[in-house]
């Protein structure tokens, strides 16, 4: 059977949340699935009339399943990739559909690329387990450098390390896709703040984990994304970064200046408080209810 049901219970949950068999990236879709697994009854209760295809390759659906879904209310995403024309053809079979995108700039890409009309898009960001991602240490003496998809990392990393050594902080480095959740949590738990070097983020779940761990972040600004056809789109390297959680820096300003500006504000950042206010389970659940009801 090509479609994997997450769970099978007599209350009608089977088939409501689906994950298609494919090679899933553990640091992306698996984070969403872990959260959904923890709260599956809550989501099933608000999606009684919907079939939710959360992640995977829609081409793996059987012909019968594709036809069956044409008479259903179908919720798609946030971890389904729609760039392939064959996938677009499958999606167009379902008249009653909503596609979840994790941030505003991703919705703009869908609309401007004519992947989907705006009325079929729902901007909804998932969350992570705030009880797991919870700080334990109050006296933190390290700084975390997080590296993801950054082609100039060697030059900037060297400059960053030189600038940070002046502040007598041991540096911890993590690279996207090369750590377990517990390893990442341990390093966040030891860090007073984090510096993020990477490309664009559709949501930024690792950033959210850092904020729940009460770690302010200084994020390299990336505001352009190039699609597979070479078209550039406005984007973000941290769509949900606010002044409560940290701020951006860019390469046009010397790294020393960016760090000094960040350090001045360091005592005033409240990332965990902000995350609990805006990304608690109840808030995220309510966001989806409101989006579907519109």
Image (spheres, helix red, strand yellow):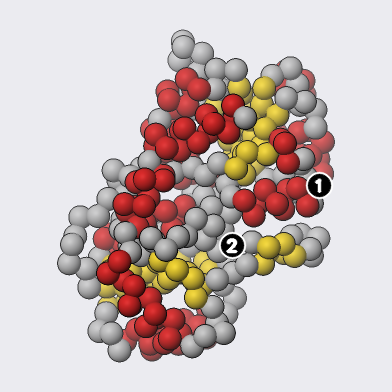
* Viewer can see residue 58: no
Question: Mark 2 to mark 1: distance in Å?
Answer: 20 Å
Residue under pointer 2:
236
195 vs 52, left or right, is left
Q: Find residue 1 and name its label.
A: none
Where residue 57 sits, quadrant-wise, is: top right
Name the residue: 25% across, 84% down: 168
Nearest the eye: 55 or 221: 221
Coordinates of residue 207 in the picture (x, y in percent): 43, 58
165 vs 18, left or right, is left
Name the residue: 61% across, 23% down: 51
Height in image: 280 above or below 265? above
5 vs 283, left or right, is right
Quadrant including the N terminus: top right
Q: Tell me which numbered mark, 2 or 1, is placed earlier along the sequence.
A: 1
Coordinates of residue 148 in the picture (x, y in percent): 52, 66
* Mark 2 secondary-structure assignment: loop
Where residue 52 sits, quadrant-wise, is: top right
* Viewer can see residue 101: yes
Height in image: 88 above or below 17? below
Q: Residues within 10 Å of mark 2 (few under 14, many from 20)?
A: many
* Mark 1 secondary-structure assignment: loop
Name the residue: 71% across, 35% down: 120
Quadrant including the C terminus: top right
Nearest the eye: 49 or 153: 49
Residue under pointer 1:
114
Height in image: 110 above or below 7? below
Nearest the eye: 216 or 147: 216
Count of labels in the image: 2
Name the residue: 25% across, 65% down: 190
Coordinates of residue 229 in the picture (x, y in percent): 81, 60
């Amino acid at each position: 059977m090509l479609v994997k049901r997450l769970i099978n219970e007599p209350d009608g949950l089977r088939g409501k949340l689906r994950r298609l068999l494919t090679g899933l990236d553990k640091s992306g879709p698996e984070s969403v699935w872990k959260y959904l697994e923890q709260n599956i009854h809550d989501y099933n209760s608000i999606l009684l009339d919907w079939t939710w295809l959360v992640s995977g390759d829609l081409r793996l659906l059987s012909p019968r399943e594709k036809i069956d879904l044409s008479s259903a209310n179908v919720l798609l995403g946030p971890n389904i990739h729609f760039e392939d024309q064959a996938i677009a053809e499958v999606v167009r079979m379902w008249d009653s559909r909503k596609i979840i995108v994790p941030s505003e700039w991703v919705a703009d890409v869908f609309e401007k690329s004519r992947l989907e009309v705006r009325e079929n898009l729902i901007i909804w960001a998932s969350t992570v387990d705030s009880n797991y991602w919870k700080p334990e240490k109050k006296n933190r003496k390290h700084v975390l450098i997080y590296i993801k998809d950054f082609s100039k990392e060697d030059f900037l990393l060297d400059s960053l390390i030189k600038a940070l050594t002046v502040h007598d902080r041991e540096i911890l480095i993590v690279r996207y896709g090369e750590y377990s959740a517990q390893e990442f949590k341990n390093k966040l738990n030891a860090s007073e703040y984090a510096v993020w070097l990477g490309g664009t983020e559709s949501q930024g779940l690792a950033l959210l984990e850092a904020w729940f761990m009460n770690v302010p972040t200084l994020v390299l600004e990336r505001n352009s994304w190039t699609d597979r056809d070479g078209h550039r789109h406005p984007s973000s390297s941290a769509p949900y970064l606010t002044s409560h959680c940290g701020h951006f820096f860019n390469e046009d300003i010397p790294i020393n200046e960016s760090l000094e500006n960040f350090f001045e504000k360091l005592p005033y950042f409240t990332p965990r408080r902000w995350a609990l206010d805006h990304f608690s389970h109840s808030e995220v659940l309510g966001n989806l209810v409101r989006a579907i009801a519109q």
